[in-house]
Amino acid sequence: MARNAITAAAAGDQTGEQESVVVHVQLRPRRGSTRKCLAALAALAAEHEDVVFAVTGLSKDDRVVRVTVGVDLGPRTAVARFSPQAQAAYAFVSALFTSLYDHMPVYTAEPSGAERAAATTLLEHVTAGVARADALPVDALDALPGSSVAHSPIPSPRLPGPGERIPA
């Protein structure tokens, strides 16, 4: 994923001679499957080596993590003519929706400044190979700056009481 991902700063600084078109797709994995989602995204990126994309936004709430992926379709004039770069990007977006459907992909607007900052922090942690004090890899959620939702452990399901059991 690193060899073809552009940084979040570069995604926002597309001031070349021709305006580039970026499509944002948001993946919303449940909090427990964030690593699985990012691994699937990396595997998909390996299949589409010629597509330029980046994790442009990252946020969370009490149930899901919202990972925003910005896919560069290329210069606006080339997109209108279905250039090879645009066709490859469309194929990548299509594959996002078909192969990562468990992570509830949706088209979305450009991420906010806070979401971009969180994505930048995550990418810096991943590229630097930061590890926790206990030598385990950093969790994607640990890289998020302060969130409005407190990190609470998920309680285990309770067992049914004697009067609640249904005979088989």
Image (spheres, helix red, strand yellow):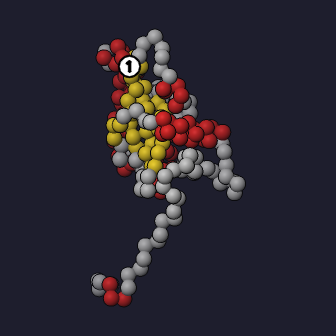
Query: Front-most of 9 and 100?
Result: 9
* Residue 162 visible in image: yes
In the rendered view, does 123 fall on the left or right side of 29? right
- The image quarter containing residue 74 is top left
Give the image location of residue 131, x and y in percent: 67, 49
| Residue 144, x across and y down, in percent | 55, 46
Q: From this viewpoint, which residue is outermost toward the top? A: 17
Residue placed farthest to the front in the image?
148
Crowd tier of the residue under label 1, counting other residues whose Cα lies within 10 Å: few below 14, some 14–19, many 20 or above: some
Q: Which residue is mark 1?
A: 84
Name the side, left or right, on which 120 lies relative to 161: right
Using the image, determine if residue 106 lies above or below residue 72.
Answer: below
Query: Which residue ends up furthest to the bottom in the rendered image?
Result: 162
Q: What residue sits 56% from the left and 41% below the top?
A: 122
Image spot of residue 7 (x, y percent): 54, 30
Residue at the image point whose x is 55% and y is 49% from the top: 146
Q: Amino acid at mark 1?
A: Pro
Q: Quadrant of the C terminus?
A: bottom left
Say which quarter of the image contains residue 77: top left
Would residue 95 be seen by someone viewing this image from the given angle? no
What residue is shown at x 41% (from left), y 79% (from top)? Answer: 159
Q: Secondary structure at mark 1?
A: helix
